[in-house]
Amino acid sequence: MAGVSTQTVSRVLNGQPFVSKDTLQRVNEAISTLGYRRNLTARALVTGSSLVIGTLVTKPTMAGPSGATLAIEQMARARGYWMSLAGLQSNDPDENYKVISHFVDQGVAGIIAVAQTQVCVDTTLEAAKDMPLVLVTSGVVPAGHSTVDIDQAGSVAQLMAMLRGLGHRRIAHISGPAGDLHGDVRLEAWRQALPAGQSPTELLVKGDWSSTTGYAAALSLLALDEPPTAIFCGNDEMALGVLRALYEHGYKVPDDMSVVGFDNITGTDCSIPPLTTIRQNHDALGFAAMELMLDALDQAPARGVTIPGELIVRASTAPPPLRRGG
């Protein structure tokens, strides 16, 4: 209908140069008239590239993984790729292996794994074989594989330095569940930043990322003979539970106790009081993950990228009561 060769149509469809404006208009008019749609499966067979990125996400309903996934999808689409998404709520290596194997069988161009557990990291590396691969993780990854993550430890160091600068010495931590890579890194960074002589055992309570465990953990910390003057929560949801527990038991935040979170989820600027926290730049993370994938598709050397976190200071932090009183 356009009166041109199939090669010219291909150049138009793929945005290649050396096509006149008149030819471009005729081809596009023919496409519109015929209602033509490209068969991406057939294209993949011819070119050897599907323009689809297989993306595996552990704990996809949580703020961190979901934010990372959305950013990766948007960046992939901006670069002409689409996402095939699989979410894992369990830590089952067999299920993980099946998902990655399905991506390989599907003929995706590459695989991005947002891995919250070391099991996911290890299983993905085993199942992906020679596929172009990018791991969004805080886990241990052998040399030769591209990785990207928010600087979890550095972000915690920022929070702890701010609290210690205010004069806090007894800084408790409500951690994420054991085995969660972000939770484990944040826990260790808190331990490293404690003032000398502080007991990490006494000031540590295990949580599961939920506001319910934040509430319960706060009650156990308030029951100590010497309660902390500040609580660092492994994420914002647990921090919201802490704020409620302190309010119900007559503690004023931050006059009687400071509270900090991690993630900067929607609504933390409107909690009472607004929550001091760490903002994770998921847009930058998604951009970096996709850039690393494009490098892997071009067989460029693997590399690691670390995105800094941003300390957001709000009204939930202040000097401890004794210092405030002089």
Image (cartoon, rainbow, N blue to C red):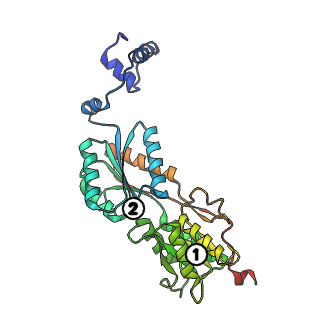
Q: Read off the residue under disc 1.
A: 231
Q: Position of residue 232 (x, y in %)?
A: 56, 73
Return the residue found at the far front.
248
Taking the spot 53% from the left edge, 86% from the top edge, the residue there is: 198
Earlier residue among tags 1 and 2 = 2
* SS class, disc 2: loop
Q: Is residue 65 left or right of residue 84?
A: right
- Judged from this view, the residue extending furthest toward the bottom is 225
- Please report the residue visible at 37 percent of the width from the left and 59 percent of the height from the top: 89
Q: Do tag 1 and tag 2 residues touch (Cβ < 8 Å)?
A: no
- Classify the position of the C terminus by image quarter: bottom right
Looking at numbered disc 1 in the image, what kind of residue is underneath it? Ile
- Pick the residue in front: 192 or 53: 53
Residue 116's disc number: 2
Relative to residue 219, is residue 16 depicted above or below?
A: above
Q: Position of residue 260 (x, y in %)?
A: 59, 69
Q: Which mark is residue 161?
A: none
- How many C-alpha atoms fall within 10 Å of the one at disc 1: few (<14), some, or many (≥20)? many
Q: Point out residue 52 in the picture as x, y percentages from the top left corner.
A: 34, 40
Q: Is residue 25 visible?
A: yes
Query: Please, what is the three-letter code of the amino acid marked with disc 2?
Result: Gln
Is residue 162 visible to the viewer in this orientation of the structure?
no
**Quadrant placement of the N terminus:** top left
Query: Horizontal placement of 10 versus 283: left or right?
Result: left
Q: Which residue occupies 28% across, 51% down?
A: 100
